[in-house]
Amino acid sequence: MKLSLLDQVQIAPGSTAGEAIRQSIRLSQTLEQLGFERHWLVEHHAVPYEACVDPMVMALALAQATSSIRVGVGGVLLNNYSPYKIAESAKTLAALAPGRIDLGLGQSVSGPLPDLALQPDRTQKPAHDQAAKVKEVLGHLFADLPADHPFAPLKVMPDEAPPLPWIMAVGQTSAERAGTLGLPLALSAFHRPEEAQAAAAAYRKAFRPSPRPGLPPAPKLFLALRVTSAPSLAEAERLAMPMRWAFQQRRRFNIMPQRLPSVDEAVELAGGVWPAETGDWPMYTICALADLRARLLRMAEACGADEIMLQDVLPDPERRLSHYHDVAQVFS
């Protein structure tokens, strides 16, 4: 089973954004040594305790600091940008790190104010067609826009191979889009985990191989999971508290924490340690290391995935490093 990381570049308590970026570079070098397949970076805006507002720039830093691990923008939010500009940046990345760049294509909201600030025209609500934008990005990446397309004369580094494009999906609509376009699928099982199996099945049913070079001849997907593990379940539940408390504040109470709490602070703020979810498809996979491999393999096999992408919100950089050493050891 291949392992990868989805990185939010979280800022440790008492630290700075610059230090978080440097720690992420160090983490990428460690993941490469441990044999991880890829290191993807989120695009998040207006999250005070995260330092990944520009994953394209971060991806370049990771690629230059490593030599073999695949680096991904996971993902670029098409609702915020011009497909032409995305293709220019992505092909520049691919030219600087040939054969190692992934481009995850997604859409998400960051909040009314940052969403407005990201738009070039703030006087009207932007018109967004995700399917059309995906097709345009692909046309620019592979230099094969239809002859009658208004941007067909624009060629973005046609002599350079593109990054590998992925569709990021939570549910069936985006998963089916990945299948019909013959693209690999980055399937999130932590936004709406109950939909993961149906989305994977919809992707496989819709899949049609693409004639574009470098795209997979058969369905290819990884499963993204939020994971915290430790030698004991009790310790794993404690370590997961900063992540769970922060997301509770954001999702349930619409409160954005101004910094990420330490483990002890999160336990105090939450009034104790919350027990791990026990269902087959939890939003947070929290378990003892002895149970980790079986838990993750069961979910991956249910979706037909041959790769698991892990996400954590551990506030201590050293604990993050040791966590991925532990995970790699479990799967070795």
Image (tube, helix red, strand yellow):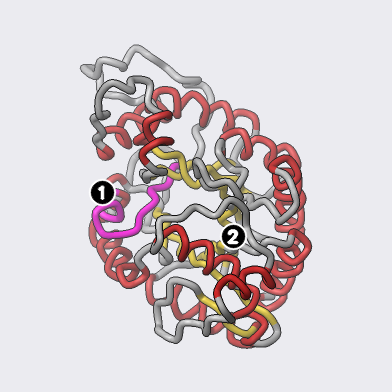
Q: What residue is shown with label 2?
A: 4
Classify mark 1: residues with Cα within 10 Å, few (<14), some (14-19) or many (20+).
some
Q: Dividing the image into 4 quarters, which one contains the C terminus?
A: bottom right
The mark lying in front, picked from 1 and 2, is: 2
The front one of 52 and 262 is: 262
Tell me where residue 145 appears, x and y as whole percent: 30, 24
Residue 98 falls left or right of residue 320: left
Residue 284 falls left or right of residue 331: left
Give the vertical position of 330 relative to 66 (above or below): below
Q: Residue furthest top?
A: 153
Chain-order first, disc 1 or disc 2: 2
**Residue located at (72% from left, 37% from top):** 64
The front one of 195 and 162 is: 195
Magenta span contains residue 166: yes
Q: Which mark is residue 168?
A: none
Q: What amino acid is labelled 1 in the image?
A: Thr
Residue 33 falls left or right of residue 69: right
Query: Disc 2 on helix, strand or loop?
Result: strand
**Residue located at (61% from left, 33% from top):** 57
Magenta region: which residues?
165-177
**Residue located at (32% from left, 50% from top):** 178
**Residue located at (37% from left, 45% from top):** 108
Tell me where residue 327 appears, x and y as whole percent: 67, 73
Q: What residue is shown with label 1?
A: 180
Residue 283 falls left or right of residue 195: right
Which image quadrant for residue 193? bottom left
Tell me where residue 46 appears, x and y as whole percent: 51, 42
Query: Disc 1 on helix, strand or loop?
Result: helix
Q: What amino acid is labelled 2 in the image?
A: Ser
CA gap between label 1 and label 2 equals 25 Å
Q: Dividing the image into 4 quarters, which one contains the N terminus?
A: bottom right
Magenta span contains residue 299: no
